[in-house]
């Protein structure tokens, strides 16, 4: 039986820029991504996204955050796992992004997103997300964390 996890990702967008976080430790270390993490047992994905954004980059997105879809990940590894990720966007927030022990935040022009330094699936869904499209994709990864199957917009 594989492990099942619910998680969140939140991206800040302003004008023609997107905020990405460089993961300094833990799962995804060394990659750029949105901010987020696992949903605790006593919280909704929305509350988790607000909490994680505050913990990881010091900004409050409560009242501004919008759900943009769900991505299902299946990891066919030695310890199989399924992760369902709720994806959010915030175009307004309170505070300025700061570096924490886990994340180094940085603004990127939306036409200069460093896809080569991100998860391989990001180049397949993030451009649609940036354009405001809802996302409902699924991706299957192998032991080498390469995509072996995917479905877009199911």
Image: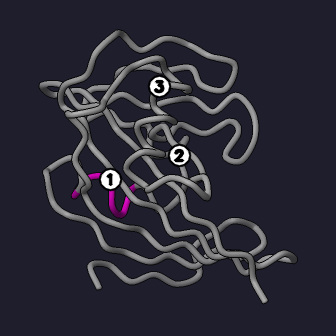
Label 3 to label 1: alpha-carbon separation: 22 Å
Q: Of circles 3 and 2, which is in front?
A: 3
Q: Secondary structure at mark 1?
A: helix
> Mark 2–mark 1 contact, CB under 8 Å?
yes
Q: Earlier in the sequence, mark 3 or mark 1?
A: 3
How crowded pointer 2 is (Cα within 10 Å; few <14, some 14-19, many 20+) is rated as some
Identify the main secondary structure in magenta.
helix
Tell which residue pokes out farthest to the right in this image.
78
Measuring from the top left, give residue 97's x and y in whole percent: 41, 14
Q: Does residue 7 appear left or right of residue 71 in this picture? A: right
Q: Earlier in the sequence, mark 2 or mark 1?
A: 2
Label 3 to label 2: alpha-carbon separation: 22 Å
Identify the image's colour scheme: rainbow, by chain, secondary structure or one colour: one colour
Q: Magenta residues?
A: 123-128
Q: Does residue 140 appear left or right of residue 122 in this picture? A: right
Asked if residue 124 lies in the magenta stretch, the reply is yes
Residue underneath mark 2: 118
Residue underneath mark 1: 126
Q: Is residue 97 above or below residue 74?
A: above
Measuring from the top left, give residue 121's x and y in whole percent: 47, 62
Measuring from the top left, give residue 61's x and y in whole percent: 31, 29
Seen at 49% across and 21% down, the residue is 57
Measuring from the top left, give residue 105's x and y in whole percent: 48, 21
Seen at 53% across and 37% down, the residue is 32
Label 2 to label 1: alpha-carbon separation: 11 Å
Q: Secondary structure at mark 2?
A: loop
Seen at 61% across and 77% down, the residue is 74
Tell which residue pokes out farthest to the bottom in this image.
1
Instruction: Tell me the number on the disc at residue 54.
Output: 3
How crowded pointer 1 is (Cα within 10 Å; few <14, some 14-19, many 20+) is rated as some
For the C terminus, the quadrant is: bottom left
């Amino acid at each position: 039986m594989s492990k099942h996890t619910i998680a969140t990702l939140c991206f800040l967008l302003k004008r023609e820029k997107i905020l990405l976080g460089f993961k300094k430790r833990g799962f995804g270390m060394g990659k750029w991504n949105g901010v987020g993490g696992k949903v605790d047992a006593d919280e909704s994905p929305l509350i988790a996204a607000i909490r994680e954004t505050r913990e990881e980059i010091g900004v409050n997105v409560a009242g501004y955050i919008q759900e943009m879809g769900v991505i299902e990940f299946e990891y066919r590894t030695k310890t199989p796992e399924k992760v369902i990720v709720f994806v959010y966007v915030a175009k307004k927030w309170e505070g300025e992004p700061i570096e924490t022990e886990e994340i180094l935040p940085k603004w990127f022009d939306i036409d200069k997103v460093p896809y080569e330094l991100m998860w391989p699936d990001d180049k397949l869904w993030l451009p649609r997300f940036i354009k405001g499209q809802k996302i409902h994709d699924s991706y299957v990864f192998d032991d080498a964390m390469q995509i072996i199957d995917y479905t877009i917009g199911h």
